[in-house]
Image: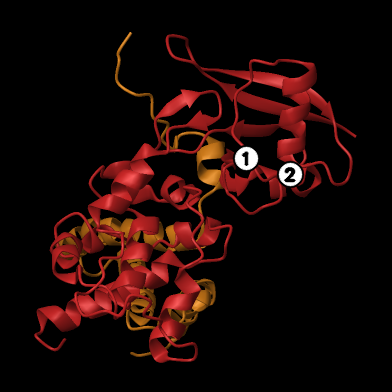
Amino acid sequence: MPTSLSVFRWSRGERERWQAFDVDAGPDTTVLDALVEIQRRRDPSLAFRYACRVGMCGSCAMVVNGRERWACRTRLVSLRAGAIRVRPLYHFPLLRDLVVDMAPFTARMRAVGAALVPAPDAEPYARIPAGSTERSEIDPAIECIGCGMCLSACTMVGHNARFPGPAALNRAFTLERDSRDAAGEARWRVLLGDDALARCHGQGACTEVCPMGLAPTTSIVRLRQMATRKLLGLG
Amino acid sequence: MSDAPRVLRRDWTTPEGWRGTTTGMWAWLIQRAAAIALLVVVALHLVNPFRRGLQAALLALVLLHALLGVRALLLDFGLPLRWHRALFVLALVMTATIFVTVWTWRWY
């Protein structure tokens, strides 16, 4: 079935443009398959990023028909009839065509202290037992693959460069529930600042687009509940 | 040409920009829009409290704004996020139901 793909093109020093390509799509042809086909047979200069091709790594995240998706898991037939528009993720610096610079993702993670800082008295191989309340709270939030779709979908990330965004706040929640972590004091200074928890409007766009089915909005709500208890001197 | 990095933002003036608008964003947008509309309607209502159209608009907007606010509060208090779409629909249905009930009730 012939399908038309309209692809965002841009490289430094050039004006952005949309380029149309017709591809022959089968029932299981994905957006990534179509892009690979275009790159191999039509235009080798088309830049896009992918690695695993099977919906694990998240590196082929892009905006297809206005919504953040995995290119490798999005079948062309699942999209509305008509031209399919493929553009890079929002809110990230463009490098070329569909490729964005993921450095801001890492920077936002760092901003909320997203690395585990072991408590001085923590066992070297301390584990959080399966079945514990702590484990059951953390488990649903730990499978983030760092694809950046949530940052692209979040309207507040677009408006406030200092807002850590869904992925970083989700990560902060897992660490706040982790009894082995000792960086809570510094992290709460950031979380309770003007540009973190208070900025989320709870629109849930991050949760809607997360390919791993995580719910950063829930993590942010849980952090807010913890923050409220802190501010009331209850926890 | 500027050396500043080129960063794309959702263009709200195009259909594509709106296509990715999720249920939660609609809930947020409608509640904020109702708040702004309320400011205008309350001001007009103070000028002439007996205009039926303004009374209807005031009732509808208050219900819409308040019930979407209750939805947000329930989610903040820990109601599972997977219910958020159902809560949005419920808020809209309750707005319509209460509006029709109150507006058609012969209270005089």
Mark 2 neighbour class, 10 Å CA radius: few under 14, some 14 to 19, many 20 or more: few
Q: How is the image coloured?
A: by chain
Kindly state the secondary structure of the residue where label 2 is placed: loop
Can residue B59 be seen here?
no
Colour in which chain B is drawn = orange
Q: Amino acid at mark 2?
A: Arg
Q: CA distance from mark 2 to mark 1?
A: 8 Å
In the rendered image, the vertical position of residue A210 relative to residue A217, given as above or below: above
Residue for point 67% across, 46% down:
A52
In the rendered image, the vertical position of residue B68 relative to residue A9, given as above or below: below
In the rendered view of the protein, which quadrant contains the N terminus of chain B? Answer: top left
According to the image, label 2 marks what residue? A80
Give the quarter of the image for residue A107: top left
Depth check, front residue: A8 or A32: A32
Place of residue A115 in the rendered image (x, y in percent of width and height, measured from the top left):
31, 60
Q: What label does residue A14 carry, if any?
A: none
Q: Earlier in the sequence, mark 2 or mark 1?
A: 1
Place of residue A34 in the rendered image (x, y in percent of width and height, measured from the top left):
76, 32
Place of residue A181 in the rendered image (x, y in percent of width and height, measured from the top left):
26, 73
According to the image, label 1 marks what residue? A65
Q: Amino acid at mark 1?
A: Asn
Q: Is residue A149 left or right of residue A163?
A: right
Can residue A16 be seen here?
yes
Residue for point 29% across, 43% down:
A159
Q: Are marks 2 and 1 on the same chain?
A: yes
User: Marks 1 and 2: in contact by CB < 8 Å?
Assistant: yes
Mark 1 neighbour class, 10 Å CA radius: few under 14, some 14 to 19, many 20 or more: many
Q: Chain of mark 1?
A: A
Task: Give the residue furthest to the front.
Answer: A124
Colour in which chain A is drawn = red
Q: Chain of mark 2?
A: A
Residue for point 36% across, 63% down:
A171
